[in-house]
Image (spheres, coloured by chain):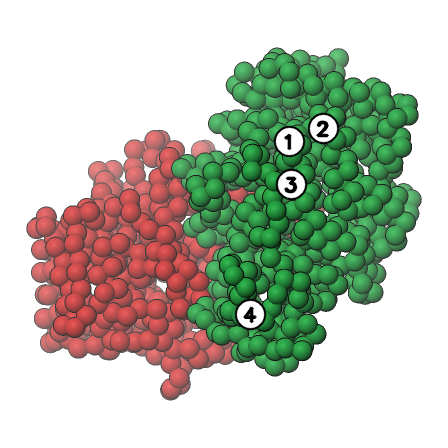
Chain colours: A red, B green
Amino acid sequence: TLGVSFPSGGQAEVLVWAPKAELVELTLNEGNTIIPLKKQDLGYWHLVTGEIKPGDTYKYRINEEQEYPDPASLSQPESVHGPSQAVDVARFKWTDDNWQNLPLEDYVLYELHVGTFTEDGTFAGLEEKLDYLKELGVNAIEIMPVAQFPGDRNWGYDGVFPFATQNSYGGPKGLQKLVDACHAKGLAVVLDVVYNHLGPEGNYLGVYGHYFTDKYNTPWGPALNFDDAWCDGVRRYFTENLLMWFRDFHIDAVRMDAVHAIKDFSPNHILREMKQHVNQLLQETGRPHYMIVELDLNDTRFINPLEEQGYGMDGQWIDEFHHALRVTMTGEQTGYYSDFSGISHLAKAYRDAYVFDGQFSEHRKKTFGIKAENNPGKQFVVFTQNHDHVGNRMLGERLGELVSFEMQKLAAGAVILSPYLPMLWMGEEYAEPHPFQYFVSHTDPDLAEAVRKGRKAEFADFHAEGEAPDPMAEETFNNSKLQWDLIGKEPHQTLFKYYQTLLRLRRELPALKNLDRKAVEAEADEATKTLVLR
Amino acid sequence: TLGVSFPSGGQAEVLVWAPKAELVELTLNEGNTIIPLKKQDLGYWHLVTGEIKPGDTYKYRINEEQEYPDPASLSQPESVHGPSQAVDVARFKWTDDNWQNLPLEDYVLYELHVGTFTEDGTFAGLEEKLDYLKELGVNAIEIMPVAQFPGDRNWGYDGVFPFATQNSYGGPKGLQKLVDACHAKGLAVVLDVVYNHLGPEGNYLGVYGHYFTDKYNTPWGPALNFDDAWCDGVRRYFTENLLMWFRDFHIDAVRMDAVHAIKDFSPNHILREMKQHVNQLLQETGRPHYMIVELDLNDTRFINPLEEQGYGMDGQWIDEFHHALRVTMTGEQTGYYSDFSGISHLAKAYRDAYVFDGQFSEHRKKTFGIKAENNPGKQFVVFTQNHDHVGNRMLGERLGELVSFEMQKLAAGAVILSPYLPMLWMGEEYAEPHPFQYFVSHTDPDLAEAVRKGRKAEFADFHAEGEAPDPMAEETFNNSKLQWDLIGKEPHQTLFKYYQTLLRLRRELPALKNLDRKAVEAEADEATKTLVLR
């Protein structure tokens, strides 16, 4: 296992992939102890030692020069630039032996951001709200990324330690405790993981190895190296990360961020290889784990079974369902909404999952997508909004701020009674009026300024007017928090009960949870703006 | 059809993809006539006119400013910077109605470079040698690329007009005449086509449309755009090109250059899409055409059938067979040869086609390849050398200059009696002593100098000593020509007869042409350096 682990007994095992290094030493507790690692094949450095105990902090010293935190650190108590901390993940006393992951087709998801879901902004705070979520009627919480990022405020996509659980949320033990509590209440836990890029601050991976390649250019700079020279180490790194969440944190499913930005021309795509490992884990433990991908490609190769040369992903988000629904409601035509014309596209999304499955897309300026004919409804996750559609607006308005109360109810029905897996976005169930804005807490001032500017530039396409909130301001973060006291008040309470009822109906009436797409008929009438779903 | 064509009657049809242009005009015969084209959807510009006749020269004037040759030009009588020439490819009087392409499993290939194959360096010169090739016993000539390049001397990989047949070789009619003559003699024609990059001089495509994308970086700069915005036009351009060679030039098969450098993450890979079109053409004409790829990936996805989600390529070159054979003979360990250890790798190549099918490659610094278990022998082309292994040496020495006479015979046997499709490289059959060196005739002086320098730098890895021949010198080109008068002399004549006999044996003895890989056993003994093939 990469990182510091305690496989058995008192000895720690230390393993780091550092093919670029000439010498790697472990420096313990602020440099009081320095132990050299032994070079192995393929750039790995290894050590078995009794010197390091759980709770100790450490760094790696490279070439007897600078010290850096561990790329596979489990804990960064002083955030991204500080030392790593040894954690024995096996010490946690799990009480979920009787927990069984839900069948995928039963998933009703609830996406949330730990930092803004509660006032507290921690796993512990979230744990106190599990009864509320049960009462609402969802059965799987989907947690935005928890990999360590700089500061306390971040959506999670700027994580730079994929193995370390964000310190300000409660660290690895906090997450284990949360998952255990979820399982005790019959809730599955979906974790959002980011394998397509690393954040811009505190990313020390390049010091150790060839984690990046300039073969591909991505919106975030050079791509993570999944198929160029030295890719084996990178592939192992992320594969171990995935297996860790499932094995050591009892995570039930992952939502994998923007997998279209994982550039891999290998014969065995990294997602496919990961799935093969997950299947192996299933054989060992008997516990199934799902892999759901965010995918901006209408390409069934990702979700087709391994036997059919697919990558074997269990499901994917379909933004196009959202876009069609959204344009039907609001008539928006900016940015990617320009490709959607309303209710007939929504009918197509009900019928075919992919709206573009071989047509020319004016927005993309190319023919886009293929048909998803043989993929069941349980492979598609739908929503009236998610963190992106809300937070990537300049002012971060939730749908509730943009459409009428009655329209919100209609939208909820369209999603919750769809032949797909419905996902709610925190707060939509009671029409939370607070926005969900873009916020960061970078500690590098130049970067902070660049983010401020970049954010403004991004809105050229979508919103021409008004001032963008300052992503660095704590106020922006605080303004994005849910206001729990509203739920008892009107009209929030009415909407909450409406959601509750819809979710109960989906659970109780088989006709409203039909995931057999072949049995679904959807017809739109543009003139009357009606859609008939059978 | 892209370009200028004469579908029927006297009217010409003109079609150019120029989405970047505001106005496109056809300027005829040095600008005496100027006719505007009509804008169509998706960036196409169209015209039907009686003004342009076969033989006329033309350019396109963009935005009433500069004039450029046609991206789909069929003929560039004054080379890459001059005007395009209208050609009616349907005028050629074919005499090959009775020709039937050979079954792929019967192919015995002979790779040649038109410019250096004969003193003349033209299609007409080559035509005079067809009897010689028949006598030798090959049945398919594979012609290095003929797309128009700058000057008279080039391997062909610097072509910038994929549709135009090199003027100095004899132009489009010359090629048609050659193919007709080949078919009359029972020879199939394989054409090397380059769809992964364009040459550095005379490439005007960027003026017209988004032919390139900066999403990917290749050794030749930004990649051709097969999957980014505006890719539809690029995909059509190359697909039409492929179909043109098959339909209008009766080419029997293509060898597609370095398809691993065709970067395409579309759900339907461009090669797969091309194959679907070629299948359609087969249905229309009843004539099969093969697609054979040069592929520096051991990835069966390229050569698996469409039904199995493959790209449906008929075959691929296997350089690894060559490398294993070469290292067995010479013990070379520079560059990519460093991954090969001799006779046991050769045995593996006989058994498994791919030498690396899941092992770590020290040269590539990654685990490489997957197993080719279900692909028949006819899908793999093998050789003792090809233009690359000879020409990419600093001095361009053929194998015959590097190993003994007896070893050449052994090598020939290893290839010709292999369970794969054998390919000879021009001149090897009589041990031509002339090298095949790298030569160009760029007319841009800066580029010429850059090529000179680049060529020298490239040899850091392979050859430390001696002076690289000047690629721009006509002498380098002339030195690379075959010396036909040698064939009657010894030891050349003996080797020629040896090749003749081997090729006859392959034709006549079924046991020596067994392409059923499951029936092949290959065992190596490192100690005695012997290989037993059954």
Is residue A54 found left or right of A143 in the rendered image? right
Residue that appears at 75% across and 50% down: B169
Q: Which sits earlier in the primary sequence, circle 1 or circle 4?
A: 4
Is residue A80 found left or right of B148 in the rendered image? left
Q: Nearer the viewer, residue A59 or A150?
A: A150
Q: Circles 1 and 4: CB distance less than 8 Å?
A: no
In the image, are marks 1 and 3 on the same chain? Answer: yes
Which chain's residue wears label 2? B
Which chain's residue wears label 3? B
- Secondary structure of the residue carrying numbered label 3: helix
Residue that appears at 77% across and 47% down: B122
- Determine which residue is flagged by label 1: B186
- Secondary structure of the residue carrying numbered label 1: loop
- Determine which residue is flagged by label 4: B50
Q: Which sits earlier in the primary sequence, circle 2 or circle 3?
A: 2
Quadrant of residue B527 in the image? top right
In the image, are marks 4 and 3 on the same chain? Answer: yes
Q: Nearer the viewer, residue B187 or B195?
A: B187
In the image, are marks 1 and 2 on the same chain? Answer: yes
Label disc, if present, on residue B134 of the rendered structure: 2
Quadrant of residue B179 in the image? top right
In the image, are marks 1 and 4 on the same chain? Answer: yes
Q: Which sits earlier in the primary sequence, circle 1 or circle 2?
A: 2
Give coordinates of residue B192: x percent, y percent.
Answer: 65, 44
